[in-house]
Image (cartoon, rainbow, N blue to C red):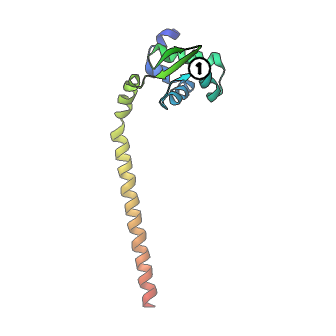
Amino acid sequence: MSRTASASNVFTAIAEPRRRQIIDLLSRGRGLAVGTIVVTLGLPQPAVSKHLGVLREVGLVSVSKQGQHRVYELNVDQLRPVYDWVKSFEQHWERQLDRIKVRAERRAQNLASTAERSTRKKGTS
């Protein structure tokens, strides 16, 4: 599969950890120049430009020229397929959290009962 074909998929694009770092940085709400991304992430400029190119190709970022700088902004709506896919696992996590809550409440009740019995024993001796 060619790089262009693999980069045409949002999931493939975000599979690369450095790209996720760039997305995270851009998600803070404002456009950033390439140089700012380079300095913030401590990556070489050619690597950042390559990653931004892939993200742009799949529509995750857009670029505008402001003076001598290229400023990139995140297109959050393009992450919708990822959100929808992850959301399908929400019921699983809710069930897991419910199970943990039930276990914690049961344990707290047992500890309270044990403490109460201990207090009663001390009071009768």
Where is residue 10? Give x, y as percent: 44, 20
Where is residue 5? Give x, y as percent: 47, 10
The residue most toward the bottom is: 125
Q: In this view, does 4 lie above or below 102?
A: above
Q: Which amino acid does label 1 sit on?
A: Val
Q: Residues within 10 Å of mark 1 (few under 14, many from 20)?
A: some
Q: Can residue 1 be seen in this view?
A: no
Where is residue 57? Give x, y as percent: 47, 13
Where is residue 96? Give x, y as percent: 38, 47
Total numbered badges shown on the rendered structure? 1
Mark 1 highlights which residue?
A: 34
Q: In this view, does 91 lie above or below 70?
A: below
Quadrant in the picture for residue 39: top right
Q: Is residue 94 above or below residue 5?
A: below
- Residue at 43% x, 22% y is 75
- Residue at 43% x, 85% y is 121
Q: In this view, does 104 lie above or below 109?
A: above
Q: Is residue 83 visible?
A: yes
Task: Decide which of 51, 25 is in the foreground and name it.
Answer: 25
Quadrant in the picture for residue 124: bottom left
Q: Is mark 1 on a helix, strand or loop?
A: helix
- Residue at 35% x, 51% y is 98
Quadrant in the picture for residue 108: bottom left
